[in-house]
Image (spheres, rainbow, N blue to C red):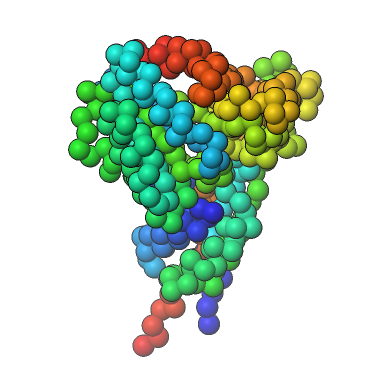
């Protein structure tokens, strides 16, 4: 005969392992003097295009930049980004829909962080799963393109709430898709009050100076 | 969907804990879950059942305590529960607040362990 089960207290964060790793990474980044910025968005919001532009422009400003890019499959993004001549490494996650701190740590194994000013981490295109995982980054950018609709933040409040800056991309298409910037800003503020918003188009160059200046200002 | 990997982490954590406490079958796992954890309850419950198979948690119950999102309102100088994560507004004064004080929870709170029956000699 089995007796009544006994209750034992655990009180442990399920993502404790990831959080501990992320904390260690953050300390390592700070010690090496490298600013680490991650990017999250839906697939197709323009992360790779923005990153391509960012690497090229920051390099021309004399900064040492590098990138890790996460994708379920293919190394296409890394190949595309390598044209900037910055060090780029692809993290192929297989069936996993997000990056985690362990993948970032392993990808950095053979890199000397102290040689870098800025490291960018492009997450897998997904607005759900990446929200649970701290990667040790100091700054998280969430991208939304004008073609996705102004209420994207209301549909995915959690990921927007974990981000520090919202970049609205493809502004060159804003008029064609009747994008309402004020409505978008309101959605953003509603789920992440006080979050800074930067609107830009890497195609026309509109708004990119403000974006680059902002990134540059993060350099210690 | 990342709930399966979350379920696997929970089960690993619970199995280790059960082992440390002398072994035995886990009858239930109590979890605190906040809406800003990024984990969907239904997807987690579904994954949990599958992930438990062949472990000390097989057949165990997942008991989820939903934790509401709380913000600190600097005008009212107190923590307030918000109705929806779509609008982090103080329900008293209507001001937006970015200071989330609760609601990111994803925590294994407790386990219910079945005793291993002592051998009768």
The image quarter in which residue B34 lies: top right
Instruction: Give the residue displayed 28% in from the left and 20% down from the top.
Output: A64
Q: Is residue A107 visible?
A: yes
Q: In this view, does B103 lie above or below A29?
A: below
Q: Which of A166 and B88 is in front in this view?
A: A166
Q: Can residue B110 be seen in this view?
A: no
Residue furthest bottom in the image? B121
Q: Nearer the viewer, residue B89 or A143?
A: A143
Q: Is residue A162 above or below residue A212?
A: below
The x and y percentages for residue A92 are: 36, 49
Q: Nearer the viewer, residue A48 or A192?
A: A48
The x and y percentages for residue B41 are: 62, 54
Instruction: Give the residue displayed 59% in from the left and 64% down from the top.
Output: B46
The image quarter in which residue A116 lies: top left
Q: Quick one: quadrant of the N terminus of chain B?
A: bottom right
Q: Which of A112 and A59 is in front in this view?
A: A59
- For the image, the number of numbered tags is 0
The x and y percentages for residue A9 are: 49, 53
Q: Quick one: quadrant of the C terminus of chain B?
A: bottom left
Instruction: Give the residue displayed 50% in from the left and 23% down from the top.
Output: A202
The x and y percentages for residue A29 are: 31, 27
Instruction: Give the residue displayed 42% in from the left and 51% down from the top.
Output: A72
């Amino acid at each position: 005969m089995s007796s009544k089960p006994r209750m034992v207290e655990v009180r442990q964060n399920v993502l404790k392992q990831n959080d501990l790793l992320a904390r260690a990474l953050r300390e390592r980044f700070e010690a090496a003097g490298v600013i680490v910025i991650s990017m999250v968005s839906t697939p197709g919001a323009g992360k790779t295009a923005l990153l391509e532009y960012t690497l090229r422009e920051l390099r021309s400003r004399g900064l040492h930049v590098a990138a890790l890019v996460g994708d379920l499959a293919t190394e296409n993004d890394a190949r595309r980004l390598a044209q900037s001549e910055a060090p780029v490494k692809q993290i192929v996650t297989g069936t996993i829909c997000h990056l985690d701190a362990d993948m970032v740590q392993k990808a950095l194994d053979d890199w000397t962080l102290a040689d870098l000013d800025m490291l960018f981490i492009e997450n897998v295109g997904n607005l759900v799963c990446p929200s649970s995982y701290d990667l040790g980054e100091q700054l998280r950018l969430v991208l939304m393109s004008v073609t996705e609709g102004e209420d994207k933040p209301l549909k995915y409040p959690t990921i927007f709430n974990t981000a520090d800056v919202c970049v609205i991309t493809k502004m060159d298409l804003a008029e064609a898709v009747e994008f309402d910037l004020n409505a978008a800003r309101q959605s953003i503020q509603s789920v992440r009050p006080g979050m800074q918003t930067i609107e830009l188009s890497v195609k026309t160059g509109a708004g990119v100076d403000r974006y680059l200046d902002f990134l540059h200002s993060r350099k210690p | 969907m990342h709930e399966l990997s979350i379920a696997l982490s929970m089960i690993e954590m619970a199995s280790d804990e059960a082992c440390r406490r002398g072994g035995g079958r886990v009858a239930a796992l109590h979890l605190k879950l906040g809406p800003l954890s990024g984990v969907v309850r239904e997807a987690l419950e579904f994954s949990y059942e599958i992930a438990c198979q062949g472990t000390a948690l097989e057949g165990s119950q997942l008991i989820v305590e939903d934790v509401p999102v709380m913000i600190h309102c600097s005008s009212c100088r107190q923590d307030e529960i918000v109705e929806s994560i779509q609008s982090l507004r103080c329900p008293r004064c209507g001001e937006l607040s970015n200071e989330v004080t609760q609601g990111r929870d994803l925590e294994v709170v407790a386990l219910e362990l079945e005793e291993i029956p002592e051998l009768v000699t």
